[in-house]
Image (tube, grey):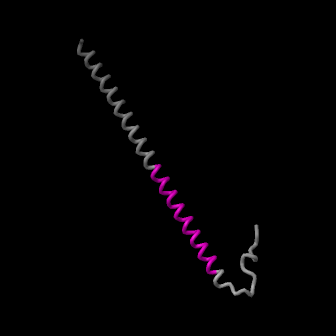
């Protein structure tokens, strides 16, 4: 084996090693990106659910207040709503 062949062989080995390392880094980056995307989606779903529950509790509290303070002299607001 001449020194040129040895140099070419070592360069080829280095290129193969670098491309393998690059593929591994890309795969790790992809897995990390997927993990954080999943975490973000779970958190967004959690926040949306919390907001929905808070909105429902507020709506129920308003409804209870209206029922408690209804004087019976006027039709309740349910009958005065404009239906769209």
Quick one: quadrant of the C terminus? bottom right
Instruction: Tell me if residue 44 comes above or below residue 70 in the rendering.
Output: above
- Residue at 58% x, 69% y is 55
Q: Nearer the viewer, residue 2 or 60?
A: 60
Measured along the vertical axis of the image, is residue 35 above or below residue 69?
above
Residue at x-position 32% and y-position 22%: 12
x 30%, y 24%: residue:
13
Quarter of the image that includes the N terminus: top left
Report the residue at 39% width, 33% height from top.
23
Residue reaching furthest to the top: 1
Residue 25 shown left or right of residue 83 in the figure? left
Q: Main secondary structure of the magenta part?
A: helix
- Please identify the quarter of the rendering in which residue 6 is found: top left
Q: Is residue 49 left or right of residue 31?
A: right
Q: Say above or below: 59 vs 9.
A: below
Q: Nearer the viewer, residue 18 or 65?
A: 65
Give yes or no for residue 57 being in the magenta stretch: yes
Point out residue 47 in the picture as x, y percentages from the top left corner.
Answer: 50, 61
Q: Is residue 50 magenta?
A: yes
- Residue 42: x and y, percent? 48, 54
Taking the image as shown, residue 23 lies to the left or right of residue 75, namely left
Query: Foreground: 53 or 44?
Result: 53
Which segment is the magenta one? 37-65
Residue 52: % across, % down: 56, 64
Estimate the x, y position of residue 26 in percent, counting from the top left.
Answer: 40, 38
Count of residue discs: 0
> Quarter-wise, where is residue 5 in the image?
top left
């Amino acid at each position: 084996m001449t020194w040129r062949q040895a140099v070419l062989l070592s360069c080829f080995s280095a290129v193969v090693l670098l491309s393998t390392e690059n593929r591994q880094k890309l795969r790790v980056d992809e897995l990390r990106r997927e993990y954080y995307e999943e975490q973000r989606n779970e958190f967004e779903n959690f926040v949306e659910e919390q907001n929905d529950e808070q909105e429902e509790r507020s709506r129920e509290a308003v409804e209870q207040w209206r029922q408690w303070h209804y004087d019976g002299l006027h039709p309740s607001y349910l009958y005065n709503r404009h239906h769209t």
